[in-house]
Amino acid sequence: MKKITFLIALMVFTFGQSQNLALSGAATASSELQPASNANDGNAGTRWESVHGPSGDITIDLGASYNIGQILLNWEGAFADEYEILISDDPTFATSTTIFSTTTGDGGIDNLSVTGAGQYVRMNGIHRFLNAYGYSLYEFEIYEAVDPLTDATLSDLTVNGTTVTDFSINTLNYNVVLPQGTTVVPTVVATSSQGTASAVVTDATSLPGTTSVLVTAEDGTTTNTYNLNFTVQVTPMSTTFDLTFEPGTTGSIASYWNSFENGSNPPFEVVSNPDPSGINTSATVGKYTSLAGADMQWAGCENQHGTIWKWELDDTSTTLTIDIYKSVISNVMVKIITETNGTVYAVQQPNTVINAWETLTYDISGLVTHGENHDLDQIVVHSDIVNPRTSDNVAYFDNISWEGLITANAPVLGVANYEATEFKVYPNPAQNVWNIKSSNLVVNSVQVFDVLGKQVISLNPNSEEVSIDASTLPAGIYFARIKSETGSNSIKLIKK
């Protein structure tokens, strides 16, 4: 359920695209059966819960005084049907201003337009909908007011006449699953929050695909881009999977492959075919360099989880083939991995020719009954298994092909879905520092790239919270690739 409740007032400022101030604030409450900090952790799966009783409040200390334009309350089932929002610069609330109140609350998500300034924001519960309990919030979000001249947000975003599920002016990216058999790109209508702002829709060229909406504020320079990533629901069916590394095909984006156990871990690359006159005439192929050294026989590369299809092996799954081009003879191993990193298949055999393309064939017919034969979404290639390796050995590979039961299409990848749900970034846009916070994952590494793909920052924090110093970077758009124990995600960053 989504409700928009407007406070009737003469307002010079309104709410718009801004950071959730509560994420970097401190939460306290009159009582805690579940911690108050759960309400501002950016995780809708955790909640604050007061003791069972008629009174209860929760306060967010923003750390400084702000002009507030929007508050979002995501209620659990124990919601307040009568409550008020207070704001103050006094932590005791001896003096405060009531910026919102209601006696007809009905739970769900309350998205409130408000006007007020202060450091401390409090939800004060007056009456409970469920008298046997107290009050409970999944999230308490607070947003700064912005000048209408710079408001580049949408007040509504519809697909075929229906507002997008969980639409919020501050959420820029949406994944929309269309019914099976859909072939026509949906009609998207965007309504700007300010009538003087423009909203230009660029439709996806096909399905799956991404429709984007460029919103330009009245000042003519402030913009936001909303993205709708469309996929089509899949009924499991037998199919042939092919990783070909041709531009635009599934698995062909080099940055979505990881290198491991290989010294300095040179990156996987997509390059021109070294010999298109042979059995493999593809224009582009995968390239991996195994570095010289001892105890690095398991050097290899793998697609990141969630970047190709999801599948199972079935009665059609008899063989897996891979085209390989190498200058040395050594074993080549291919693995099939589940989305939870369980290895279902790992068999190796050597190439038999050098400096020419050769197709290696692996028997996978015995894997259909494997206990983890489900949620498969990763291919791993060890192209040069030898120890010690006396020289850097380059291997080219292409046309990885196998049969199976498709259970999910390849996702739409690229700039459109660079906002990862597992991580929160604030402030964004930022002048000097981006803060990245995860509620439950340790961030192992962060790499920041500019729009040309050049790496400009590399960090190895091994922490759930990371600060990225952006002070020396020029203004513009960047992308942070975040690696954790569950895989990799990317987030779009904006430097003011």
Image: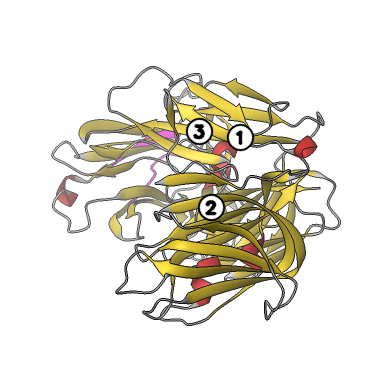
Q: Looking at the picture, which amino acid does disc 1 mark?
A: Leu
- Residue to which mark 2 is pinned: 489
Nearer the observer: mark 3 or 2; the answer is 3
The kind of residue tagged 3 is Leu
- Residue 80 in which image quadrant: bottom left
Between 47 and 120, the one lying in front of the other is 120
Q: Is residue 377 magenta?
A: no
* Cα separation between marks 1 and 2: 26 Å
Secondary structure under badge 2?
A: strand
Q: Where is residue 112? Give x, y as percent.
A: 57, 51
Query: Amino acid type of disc 2?
Result: Asn
Which residue is nearer to you in this view: 257 or 401? Answer: 257
Highlighted magenta segment, given as a residue range: 348-361
**Up/down of 332 relative to 445, above or below:** above
Q: What element carries label 3?
A: strand
Residue 232's x, y, as percent?
35, 30
Disc number lying in front (1 or 3): 1
Residue tagged by mark 1?
A: 154
Q: Mark 3 points at which residue?
A: 228
Residue at left 39%, top 46%?
1
Classify mark 1: helix, strand or loop: strand
Graded by Cα atoms within 10 Å as few (under 14), some (14 to 19) or many (20 or more), the crowding at tag 1 reads many
Is residue 377 visible in the rendered image? The answer is yes
